[in-house]
Amino acid sequence: MINDRPLKVLIVDDTIVYRKIVTDVLSDLPDVEVVGTAHNGKAAITKITSLKPDLLTLDIEMPEMDGYNLVKELVKLGLLGKPPVIVLSTEMDRNIIHDYNELGIEYVFQKPVNLRSFKQAVERSLKKYITGNN
C-alpha cells in the first residue's frame, strides 16, 4: 500500500457470515488489517473512537442503529470521511444509493458484492484517505 503501517479497517454488520466474508476478502490485501467488528451502529461509534480505523465498511439494516443513522451520526460528530465509509447491503435501490451519496459516501454496493470491485473501492478509499485527497 502507501503507508508505513497496516491500515486499519472496522467492519460493521449484524450478520456474522458477512463479517467473516469481508474479513477474509480484506485479509488478502497487503498492509490492511481488520482491527474489529461491530454488530450495529451504536457499537461501531464506540469502536471508531477507540480503534481509530482508517476505513469503515457497514451494512444498512442493523438493530439499534442502522447504517444510515450511523453515517448521519458520523456527520454530526465531524467524523465522516475520517474514516471513509464503504456501504454493503442486501437492500439496495437508487434512492438508497442517492441518500448515501448525498451524505458523501462514494462506494455503495449490493450484497453479494463483486469482490474485485469491492477490493478496488477499499484500495482507492484508503489511498485517498492516507494522501489526504478527499
Image (cartoon, rainbow, N blue to C red):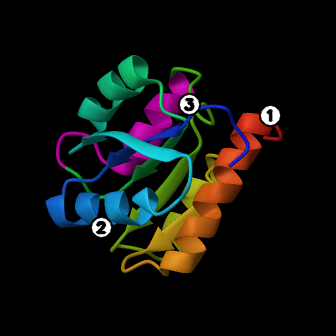
The x, y position of residue 93, in whole percent, is 47, 77
Which residue carries the number 1 mark?
Answer: 132
Which residue carries the number 3 mark?
Answer: 75
> Per the image, is 38 magenta?
no
Name the residue rendered at 53%, 59% in the picture. 29
Circle 2 crowding by C-alpha within 10 Å: few under 14, some 14–19, many from 20: few
Name the residue rendered at 64%, 67% in the picture. 120
Which residue carries the number 2 mark?
Answer: 21
Q: Amino acid at mark 2?
A: Ile
* Residue 124 appearing in the image: yes
Q: Amino acid at mark 1?
A: Gly
Mark 3 vs mark 2: which is more N-terminal? Answer: 2
Mark 3 vs mark 1: which is more N-terminal? Answer: 3
- In the displayed structure, does residue 55 sit left or right of residue 39? right
> Per the image, is 65 magenta?
yes
Mark closer to the observer (3, 1)? 1
Q: Are marks 1 and 2 in contact (CB under 8 Å)?
A: no
